Image (tube, helix red, strand yellow):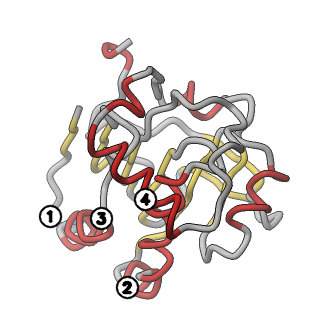
Amino acid sequence: MKSTRLQAGAQAPRFSAEALDGARVDIPSGGLVHLQFRRFAGCPICSLHLRSFARRHDELSAAGVAEIVVFHSSAESLRRHHAELPFALLPDPDKRLYSLYALEHGLSSMMHPRAMLAAMRGMVTAPMNPLDAEGGLTGLPGDFLIDGAGQLIFAKYGAHANDHLEVDDVLRFAGSTPGRRAVSVA
């Protein structure tokens, strides 16, 4: 499946979807977008990770970055776990967008020591129910930074559940966007 992975420099797959708050989300959007693919809505790793983005939302907005987060859960499940987050959340229970962006799944998603440590931290600190694994436990994350014309500036496919871009990574890439160099990371 790795041969179907998207590469930086390519056009991002186009889509239009309804966000949890009812707003329409389009890619390309006309602006800089960090498109995150997370796992299930109750994922403790995802909850912990997204709270770091919520805490620094103003910095991301000031850098011109719009956050869009996709979960392979229903809107109902997302509302229970993440309705208060300050960015667009897209329910994708049929995994249509996951397929469009060639996201993978595997048992390795939770077996890596970094993933297990993050899951434990998330269970203690993030508002969630780790047993609410709608859509399955084996999804792998993905991060895509997309410019206003729809070109992939950065593409990262996670090797395990805690393998994703951090806020500082996104800000660094956003800061280098005018003279950008497209980068893909496996």
- Nearer to us of marks 2 and 1 is 2
Determine the residue positioned at 70% across, 39% down. Answer: 92
Q: Are marks 1 and 3 in contact (CB under 8 Å)?
A: no
Determine the residue positioned at 52% across, 46% down. Answer: 38
Q: Amino acid at mark 4?
A: His
Question: Mark 1 or mark 3, which has the lower sequence index?
Answer: 3
Determine the residue positioned at 48% across, 60% down. Answer: 122
Picture quarter with the C terminus: top left
Compare residues 169 and 144 and report the one nearer the observer: 169
Q: Position of residue 82 (x, y in %)?
A: 68, 65
Element under disc 4? strand
Which dot marks residue 179? Answer: 1
Q: Are marks 3 and 4 in contact (CB under 8 Å)?
A: yes
Question: Mark 1 or mark 4, which has the lower sequence index?
Answer: 4
Q: Amino acid at mark 1?
A: Gly
- Nearer to us of marks 1 and 4 is 4
How many angstroms separate mark 2 from mark 3 (CA)? 11 Å
How many angstroms separate mark 1 from mark 4 (CA)? 18 Å
Mark 4, residue position: 34
Q: Is residue 140 left or right of residue 39?
A: left
Which dot marks residue 170? Answer: 3
Element under disc 3? helix
Q: Amino acid at mark 2?
A: Glu
How many angstroms separate mark 4 from mark 2 (CA)? 13 Å
Question: Mark 2 or mark 1, which has the lower sequence index?
Answer: 2
How many angstroms separate mark 2 from mark 1 (CA)? 20 Å
